[in-house]
Amino acid sequence: MSSQPIYALRRAEVFDSLETAPEGLTQTEAAARLELYGRNALAEPPQPPAWKKWLRAVSHPAALLLWGMGALTLLGGKPSLAVVIWGVVLINGTFSFAREYWAGRSISRLKDLLPQHARVLRDGQDRMIPTEELAPGDVLSLAEGDRVPADARVVEEFGLRINQAALTGESLPVHKSAEASLRADLAEIERSNLIFAGTSVLNGTCRAVVFNTGMLTEFGRIANLTQAVREAPSGLQQEMTRLSRVLTIIALGIGAIVLLAAQTDVGLPFQEALLLAAGIVIAVIPEGLHPTLTITLAVGAQRLAQHGVWVKRFSTLETLGNTSVVCTDKSGTLTQNQMTVRKLWVARRVFTVSGVGYAPEGKIRPEKFEPTQPSDTHADLQSFLTAGVLCNNARLCSPSANETRWTSLGDQTEVALLTLGLKGGLVDVQGVYPRIHELPFDAQRKRMSTIHRCDGQEVAFVKGAPKEVLQLCSHILINNQVAALTPALREEILQKNDSFSRQSMRVLALARRMLPVGERPYLTEKIERELVFLGLAAMMDPPRPEVAAAMEAFRSAGIRVIIITGDYGLTAESLARRVGMIHEETPRIITGVELDEMSEADLQATFAHEVIFARMAPDHKLRVVAALQAQGETVAVIGDGVNDVPALRKADIGVAMGQTGTDVAREAADVVLTGDNFALLTQAIQEGRAVYDNLRKFITYIFASNVPELLPFLLTAVFHLPFALTVLQILVIDLGTDLFPALALGMEKPEPDILTRQPRKGGMTLIDRSLLIRSIGWLGVCEALLCYFGLGWVFGGGANSFLGDNIFTHFIRSGLPAEGGAPLAASLFLGGVVFAQIGNAFACRSERGHLRWLGLFSNPILLGAVAIEGLLIVAMIQLPPLARELGLAPLPLALWGWLILYAPILYGVERTRKNIFRWLRQKGIVK
Ligand code: ATP
């Protein structure tokens, strides 16, 4: 081993120093080193201790208020009540702590679902291995869009530019080279021949030898700092926090007024007035709001993960629910990214290629028999195929003992050209024409070039988008002769390009140039000019089978889908038509060049019609997304390449494919479709919408019970009626019986029609007028009326015939309950609220629909929760010690029968209202 630092060594010494070879490590050696150095993974960042998290859960503002209320009741001479209030804060806090903990764990488990792979040489063979299995000495192959998986020394590169922002914060790309770096005054990170884990390849390709893995990498060393970055609270979380704050202030306000009124107007003693005010404050604060938000989001994310949608942050779900436009690229997203060359245009003749997939089984045949000299066409074809195989970074692997099929590594466009070469009978062209340089592909140029040596001469092969390549050509190869490229020939080529594209095929052009001696350094402008045109290859990339149905789903959900592709307009249009995205006769196709000329207003105007954005460079994609956002749209962008990254970041929701996508796209995205299934995005949007729905259901449910809880207090305060629920009894409802059904409502499945509703522009408001009117003004008032009616009916004597003559009726006959009757009245009222809430829970399962439509058993957790709710209230009223503690008294059986009726009554009343409103909506009287 050399004692010099790795960056100061020359190429050959690098291998020696790391005891490896240009062919990479052997499998056995790699396994031994993995054992020695450990897996190439970062250790989990230290978490704040659990007790700190728990402390936070029991000390948020609403909890602090309850702590204060407890203290007040203690001062008011009710120590047992104080203990109960504090107990409730602790239980509630512990509950929300457990939820958060569980949610956090499920997110970190989800990360494991996403495979990260690295391309390495092992035993001289190109292989994809899990990133974790990299060991020092492994020889990496990296290309555009790859994330650097470990710290490595570059030994070969072509146009390599690295984005080191993750380590240095500097977003400008840095050139890297394979030369030794000998300057003394540079930090490792500044060395031009070292690349580091966590950074990514912006352009170019390279081979590099791993020298540090896992926690020994530069990234590992600063990982703790990077991972400590806290996620900003989402819109929904902010709204919830605001809501809790507003409610707490309202509660305190009402409490203060009641305290004042009770003391001055009604003349209650201070202690009693204080307890009354405390009760009101507690009744108004919705204690379960935070745990429900977390659980709703966690359940949604979990459900999506089961289907292969990985949501990086819970908050993403809510934005998904608001999505109104989806911008998608084409290759690999709408299509399968399994390219097969179907047609060729070489030397003015069309050839058909048979066979599908990677296997080189198939023939290249001229489309029509023409009596030309076959040998010459053969030579043209061979030149064309050779260019396709040489100007290529992919690998095609023949079947082996482990893998019975042909497999591939690298860009699918290039793999298709390798298969084509084999079908055309080419063998070992790379050996005959060794590569000496590469001008890598970039989405801006839309082409790439490689330079090779043959028979002492240097030749450049160029491959890329037809129009872009054609404009650099001055000649064409026909009958093995280089001829001038006349305008007529150019026109013929462009027409052929369009005709292939109209059949949804991706078309690439190939060209070459014999380089004069002394062309170095190989600069794009010097190499890519005066080319000899060799021909066109048209490849089929079939649409993903699920795309057409997904388009239909998007349309009925009112979500617009727009293609923004780097590919040619006609190819995109033809595909868009096939999958049912485009219906207008002549959709507008805007190219990158046209977009550059357009004003912002013109661009905005194009969205009024069906439009396709083609030949887009990364900054164009960004501009389109920004223009849509300026119109108030919530934009989701789906992309898989480096060229999509800026748009993915700019989007409200960035979506990447888990398997075909590049590492950087996955990193930039908020959502990863692990199964590469495009249709899953509709499912994700559905879940996102369900999160809002469920929170609204939950809030409607808990707000409603505040009315019968509060009304007795207000009546007592204003009219000095002797009857009111005690503070303890209110807590029984808010934090005891109500909590389980409320949480269960947070787990409701998306409603069947959720994807036929229109997205709400500018996002949804969680609590709006209609929610407040329905919950407080209607459901709550119905509950209160029902409870008061029951109370009046029983105590007014109306229930005598129904109850028979027993002690209770005897007591009832003596008029309104005074001293001894209060516990019985409280039981009747409290039981009434709880059973009305059971009916309410079912009514809240949908804002507009009925149970039959949702299915009674589709949320079994709610059924369980309602059963617990019923059992709890029965136990609290019927078990004498419990009842005594809570200020309640057991009820006769017949009255239980009466109370149970409250559930169907409340549900029925709400159902009738829904029916009336549906009718009014149908008639267009209300919206
Ligand atoms: P999308 O943006 O929908 O994924 P795309 O893959 O065609 O489409 P880019 O990757 O930006 O988008 O490619 C733009 C164009 O560059 C392609 O249409 C093709 O003509 C050309 N091209 C793509 N890959 C290569 C390659 N490996 N070598 C040469 N040219 C390429």
Image: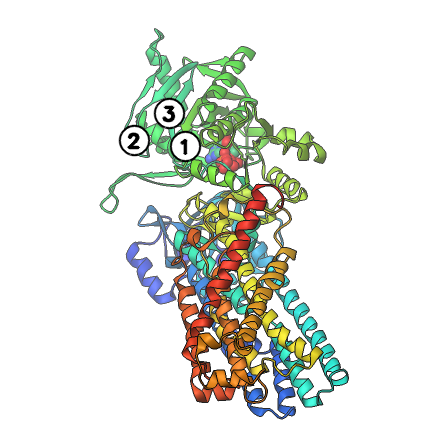
Disc 1 packing (10 Å; few <14; some 14–19; many ≥20): many
Q: Quadrant of residue 367?
A: top left
Mark 2 and mark 3: Cα distance apart in space: 13 Å
Q: N-terminal of the two: label 1 or label 2?
A: 2
Mark carried by residue 342: 3
Q: Where 655 falls versus 429 (above or below)?
A: below
Q: Position of residue 87 (x, y in %)?
A: 53, 84
Mark carried by residue 360: 2
Residue lying farthest left?
401
Mark 1 and mark 2: Cα distance apart in space: 17 Å
Q: Position of residue 535 (x, y in %)?
A: 45, 21
Residue under circle 1?
541
Q: What element carries label 3?
A: strand
Q: Residue at point 52% right, 76% down?
A: 794
Q: Residue at point 47% right, 73% down?
A: 98
Q: Position of residue 120 (x, y in %)?
A: 38, 50
Q: Where 680 falls versus 803 (above or below)?
A: above
Q: Quadrant of residue 707?
A: bottom right
Position of 415 with respect to 704 (left or right) is left
Q: Is residue 793 visible?
A: yes
State the residue in front, 910 or 332: 910
Q: N-terminal of the two: label 3 or label 1?
A: 3
Q: Is mark 1 on a helix, strand or loop?
A: loop
| Residue type at numbered disc 3 | Arg
Mark 3 and mark 1: Cα distance apart in space: 10 Å
